[in-house]
Each structure stands twice: as C-alpha cells, then as structure tokens.
C-alpha cells in the first residue's frame, strides 16, 4: 500500500517511531511539538501500543523510562520548557542506561520564550542539560525526510548503546508540510536491544563489567529480581560507595559512546569540492546553507561548501578536523539560530587554524539562504 | 532553467490563509511537482499576524521558506507590514483592498481586490476569503490549473462544505480573470 501523501514534520517523527517499533509514548502537550503527541494518541493504539498523557513533563519521561525497562521501545517528546523539566530524568535514563528516544522540537527561549517560533538554542542543552558527566547522543535532522529517517536511527542507536537519544528538531521542520512516500516498515533495518540470558541460579547484573561496553538488558517480568537507582551502583544495580566500582562504571558509561563515536557519525556535505569557504551548520540552518551555496554557485558570487552534521553529539571531530586541515579553505562560516553554541565546538576543533565568521539569529525566524548570502558577502 | 516558484500569503490568524497555502502546495503536488508549505503564526489562536510560504519546484526543495518571492498576497495591513520582505524585483503583489491601504509603491505589480466584501456579498460568508484568494491566485498566476486546485481544495475541506467552497473558488477565478 502506498504511503505517499502530505505529512508534517512532527507527524513524520511519530510515524517513524512506530515504524521503528516504538510501542509506548508518554507526553504532555506543548507547542511546537504537540502534533507528535496528537498523532501518537490516535495511531499508537492501532499498532497495539500504549499512549498516556501524563500530568506533566517529568512524569512523562519517568513513565517512558519505566516502559523501556519492561522491554518495549519507548519515546517522549516536548519543547523548550518541557525539556528543561525532563532534564532531571534524562540523567536518570543515562545512569540507568535506559534505551529511550527524547524529541525536542526547538522553540525560542529561555523559559517560555517564543512558543510558535523556531530556534536552535538547545544544542548545548542537549549536551549538558542534565548534571554530572553523562553520555549523550543527539541527532539533528534538517529536512522533512530526515525527521522520519533520523527518528528511525535514533531508536536504533538507543537500542544498540542502551542509552537515551535526543532528536533536535525545530519549529520550522515540525510544522513543515510536504509530500513524502514513506517506506514499507518491513524494509527498514531495525536494531533490537541485547537481552540478558543468565544461567539458572545466576543473578542478573544490569551493569555487568565483563560483557563489553554495553551490558545486556534484563527486562522486568522475565524472572530476574534486580534494582535500578539514580545512585552510583554496583554491577547488580545496588548503591555503592566503592571508589573503584564508581570510577569504573562512570568510565564505562562514557566510553560506550566515546569508543563508538565513529559508528554514530553521519554528515551531509554539499558543494565541498570547489569551495573556498567551509560552512558548518546543522538542522534547518544547514538546509538554508545548502540553498545559499546553490544560489551563489549559480550567479558566481561565491564558493560556499557545506558540512552538516546529522549526529551533533558526539561531535564529528575527526571529519571536521580533516576538512579544516585540508588547506582548501580560506575561512570557516558558522550560521546558527542561537547566539553562538555550535561555533564553540567548531572553535575547539579549529584550534585557531582558520578565521571563523558567524551569523547568529535569535529573533524567532529561521536563518534563510538570503541571510547567509548577505553575511558571506559582508564578512569574506 | 528549472522551475521554481515561491508564494507567501500573509493574513490575520483565523482568516484561513495557512489552509490556502496548503491548498496551493497540495495542488502543485497533484501536478507532480515538489512542494512545501511552511506556516508562521503567533501564540494567539486568532488575531495575530500569520503567514504561509509555499515553494513549488521541479527539483527537491532545500529550504521551505520564501527567499525570492514570486507572489506576495496580504489580507490585512499588519501582516502586510510584517511580512513584506524577500520580494524579487518583479514579484506580483495582491492585497485585500479595504484592509491593506498603505501599500509600498516600489515598482511591483499591485492588484487590489476587496476580497472580504466579495465573500460577504457574493457568497454570504466571510470565512470563504481564503478560498476566494486561491481562485484569484490561480487565475492571475496560472501556477497550477483550476482543475488541480479544485481537487486540492475538495481533498481538504470538511464534508458538506464542498459546494460552498467551489462557489467561492469560482468567484476568485472569475474576478482574477478580469484583473489579469
């Protein structure tokens, strides 16, 4: 059956989640992410899953974490203020190593900010929004099609690395309507979590140190009694003050992402071959940069290459480092819909090698191709 | 040169212009083109300045907001003032004659139509203005055919309102044809 029709970006996130096997959604509505919840409320029961509107955002992610431990793929979504509320439990999901997808359809901030406006001001919140050293995977789709496929990838990464994965959409993409033909879900490559199979008489160890970077999960109701807590734990999940155990567990939790960063890396490049300026941009600003590059190439006014990470965290250090070191570019350009977050990472990788120019827009409207062309002409 | 068309409809929240943008994008899609519809609105359900950008192309659309507008349509002064930007030197400007009176005289072709008055007198229902506007746009730009626009509208309006909407669409077509 053809699945070609007009979809909005938020709807694509929900449909992708269910196509990826998500069978639990808990949320609390908030603009501009509400359509995700709306679609889930109608469609999730049809695939035999559960949908719950909880009393608030904190309870929503709590429910989603609990559901994930019963063995289902689970998701919650929100925007700005709702993500700030979820921050506490994002840390809980990290330390309990819970596979979970958290969608943030970014809007203007801080606080309630500009609810119906677009923004990219939560890039650093996605990295450091919850306290303590913690692993983070965050994906930034830049088109309607990517809202679908990056959601599928988010579930796969969550399952593979037993960790929460954040999707950073934005208002413009969430509310964008366009015609798409979605794949038959049976053709998708999906990852399922590794489940523990302790031998009779053995106890299940949710944080086993001898089974690779990612210990297998033991879902509730499979015959194991075990413990999960937000406190630093031993292999069995019980709180510990053993300094060696805490150090080892913390390092394993971080390394399971750091050691596999190459496998998570995904970048889109555009017009790099003949470019003399390297634009680094993510999400819808990355798409605007591609259009700007196309326009400048067409009228001969500039040679703009675009490097657009789809995996923002972990940041694609190696590839950007190689591009900067290639000697091809006379400068770096970092446009973003915030007051300078992505540029901090670019500066870190650049290590002063190339001059960096920026475009930082936080007035509620997206960075447009026109903004980029104008700024390039002004600063280069 | 490949085909690429950008339209922006600006209005007051509640006038139905975001839906009119959806009609246009849907119609273009029915003709086998790529199309995007990207709305901008405020926190108020009704009353704030809204706009919708529609991009139609025979290539994949990289960015869904207006960058070089071929068409700018405004239903009221405030949204006209706020969203009158990204025009090309030869953009077509259509305004609601009674509500947009302060119009930039900057060389664009300007067409003034009393859309709300038409809706009230000829259709008897002001809520049909966005459908009349789509008729005007089709007649004046020929960006999609009347037939595909009709199919696009019928695919999205509530059951029972088809005849009324078709009457409003035809009115827009007729008025537009005379102004061309």
Image (spheres, grey):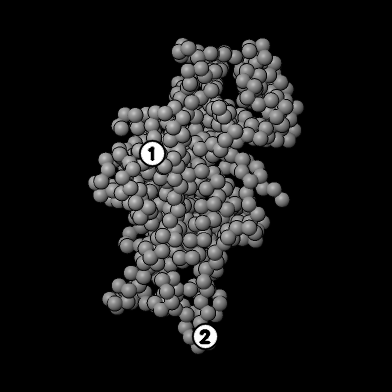
Q: Is residue B65 found left or right of B33 in the rendered image?
A: left
Q: Position of residue A4 (x, y in %)?
A: 66, 44
Q: Which image quarter: residue B81?
A: top left
Say which residue appears at 57% left-offset and 13% top-offset. Answer: B112
Residue at 40% x, 67% y is A256
Which quadrant of the structure image shows residue B57?
Answer: top right
Which mark is on residue A275?
1
Residue A185 visible within the image? yes
| Residue B174, quarter of picture | top right
Percent of width and height locating residue A70: 54, 69
- Looking at the picture, tell me which residue is in the foreground, A54 or B147: B147
**Residue in the foreground of this view, choosing between B123 and A183:** A183
Q: Give the residue at x 42% y 31%.
A: A296
Circle 2 residue: A199
Q: How many marks?
A: 2
Spatial CA span between label 2 and label 1: 59 Å
In the image, which is nearer the foreground, mark 2 or mark 1?
1
């Amino acid at each position: 059956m053809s699945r070609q029709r007009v979809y909005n970006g938020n709807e694509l996130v929900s449909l992708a989640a269910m196509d990826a096997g998500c069978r639990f959604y808990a949320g609390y509505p908030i603009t501009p992410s509400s359509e995700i919840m709306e679609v889930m409320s109608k469609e999730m029961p049809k695939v035999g899953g559960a949908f719950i509107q909880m009393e608030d955002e904190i309870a929503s992610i709590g429910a989603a974490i609990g559901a994930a431990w019963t063995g289902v793929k689970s998701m919650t979504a929100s925007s700005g203020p709702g993500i700030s509320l979820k921050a506490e439990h994002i840390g809980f999901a990290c330390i309990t190593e819970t596979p979970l997808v958290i969608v943030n359809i970014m809007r203007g901030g801080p606080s309630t900010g500009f609810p119906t406006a677009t923004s990219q001001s939560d890039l650093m919140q996605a990295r450091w929004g919850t306290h303590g050293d913690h692993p983070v995977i965050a994906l930034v789709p830049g088109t309607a099609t990517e809202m679908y496929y990056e959601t599928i990838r988010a579930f796969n990464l969550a399952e593979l690395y037993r960790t929460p994965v954040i999707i950073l959409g934005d208002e413009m993409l969430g509310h964008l309507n366009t015609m798409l033909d979605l794949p038959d879900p049976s053709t998708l490559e999906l990852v399922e979590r590794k489940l523990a199979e302790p031998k009779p008489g053995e106890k299940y160890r949710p944080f086993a140190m001898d089974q690779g970077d990612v210990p297998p999960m033991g879902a509730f109701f499979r015959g194991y009694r075990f413990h999960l807590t937000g406190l630093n734990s031993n292999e069995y999940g019980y709180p510990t003050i053993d300094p060696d155990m805490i150090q080892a567990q913390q390092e394993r939790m971080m390394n399971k992402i750091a050691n596999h960063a190459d496998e998570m890396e995904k970048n889109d490049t555009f017009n790099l071959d003949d470019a003399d300026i390297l634009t680094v941009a993510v999400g819808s600003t990355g798409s605007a940069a591609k259009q700007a590059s196309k326009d400048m190439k067409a009228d001969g006014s500039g040679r703009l290459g675009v490097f657009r990470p789809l995996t923002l965290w972990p940041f694609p250090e190696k590839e950007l480092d190689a591009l900067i070191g290639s000697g091809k570019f006379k400068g770096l350009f970092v446009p973003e819909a915030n007051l300078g977050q992505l540029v901090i990472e670019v500066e870190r990788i650049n290590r002063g090698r190339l001059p960096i120019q920026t475009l930082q827009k936080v007035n509620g409207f997206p960075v447009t191709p026109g903004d980029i062309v104008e700024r390039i002409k002004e600063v280069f | 040169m490949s085909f690429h068309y950008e339209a922006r409809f600006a209005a007051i929240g509640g006038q139905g212009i975001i839906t009119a943008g959806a009609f246009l994008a849907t119609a273009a899609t029915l003709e086998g083109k790529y199309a995007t519809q990207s709305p901008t609105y405020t926190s108020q359900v009704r009353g704030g300045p809204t706009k919708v950008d529609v991009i139609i192309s025979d290539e994949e659309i990289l960015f869904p907001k207006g960058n070089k507008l071929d068409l700018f349509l405004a239903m009221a002064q405030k949204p006209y003032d706020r969203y009158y930007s990204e025009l090309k030197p030869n953009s077509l400007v259509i305004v609601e004659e009674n509500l947009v009176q302060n119009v930039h005289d900057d060389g664009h072709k300007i067409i003034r139509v009393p859309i709300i008055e038409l809706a009230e007198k000829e259709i008897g229902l002001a809520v049909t203005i966005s459908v009349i506007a789509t008729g005007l746009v089709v007649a004046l730009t020929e960006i999609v055919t009347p037939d595909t626009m009709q199919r696009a509208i019928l695919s999205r309006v509530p059951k029972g309102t088809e005849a009324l909407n078709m009457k409003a669409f035809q009115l827009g077509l007729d008025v537009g044809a005379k102004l061309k």
